[in-house]
Image (tube, rainbow, N blue to C red):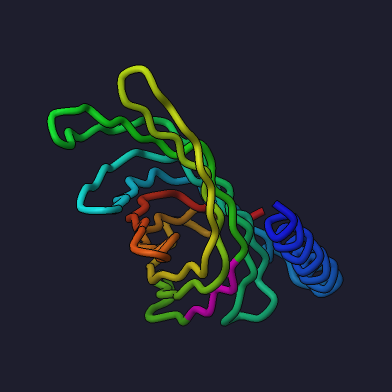
Amino acid sequence: MKKDLRTFLRATAATSFVLIAATAQAQSKPDSFYGEIGYTQINYKEAGYSIKPSVVRAMIGTEVHPNLAIEGMLGMGIADDSTTIRGVKVTGEINNTWGIFAKPKAAITPELDVFARLGYAKTKIAASVPGYSMTDSGGSTAYGLGASYKLSKQVSANVDYMSYYNKNGVKGTGMTLGVGFKF
């Protein structure tokens, strides 16, 4: 618990520092803040079984350079999934997930950007079998690749593939389809 609190406080301090610096820079740069909302299906694999719960994911970010953004992520579970293990139905869901990322990017055309994400994500999951349920959480390095296509000056269509968790034989990956908005 103390380790999780320290990690959270470090991430909060780093985010605050980056956002303060970015805000100072953004005062002379319009359209540097943006948000994205998307649908993610997580492929969660552990100990020989997998489930695919769904998440609605929000990103908020600021461009600190034309080729670099800093983002914060929050996701909330919207649908569970189940599998059968040795004749017992196991249901799993993502309660929530959050993270912070650096997002290097490059313009391929005036409308199309490709990007990478590298950062940290923490996820809380719930699982149940008839008569018993449990929750657990964990965090790890998170990374991914994606693309953004500008539909207008303020709106974009986005797609990315992310590894949110990969530790101790447990993996959580997912593809997100979403829409982005410049502020």
Q: Residue at x 50, y 53 (%)?
A: 180
User: For this rendering, which residue is in front, 179 or 172?
Assistant: 172
Residue extending furthest left? 87
User: For this rendering, which residue is in front, 2 or 78?
Assistant: 2
Q: Position of residue 73 (x, y in %)?
A: 58, 54
Q: Position of residue 97 (x, y in %)?
A: 54, 47
In magenta segment, residue 103:
yes
How many labels sit on residues? 0
Q: Residue at x 67, y 63 (%)?
A: 31
> Could you say which quadrant of the image residue 175 lies in?
bottom left
> Could you say which quadrant of the image residue 112 lies in?
bottom left
Q: Position of residue 22 (x, y in %)?
A: 78, 71
> Could you say which quadrant of the image residue 62 lies in?
bottom right
* Residue 102 appears in view: yes
- Compared with 68, 165 (above or below) is above
- Compared with 182, 55 (above or below) is above
Q: Position of residue 68 (x, y in %)?
A: 60, 79
Q: Magenta part of the protein: which range? A: 101-105
Q: Residue at x 41, y 49 (%)?
A: 178
Magenta segment main secondary structure: strand
Does residue 177 appear to the left or right of 58 in the view shown? left
* Residue 181 appears in view: no
Q: Residue at x 52, y 65 (%)?
A: 140
Residue extending furthest top? 131
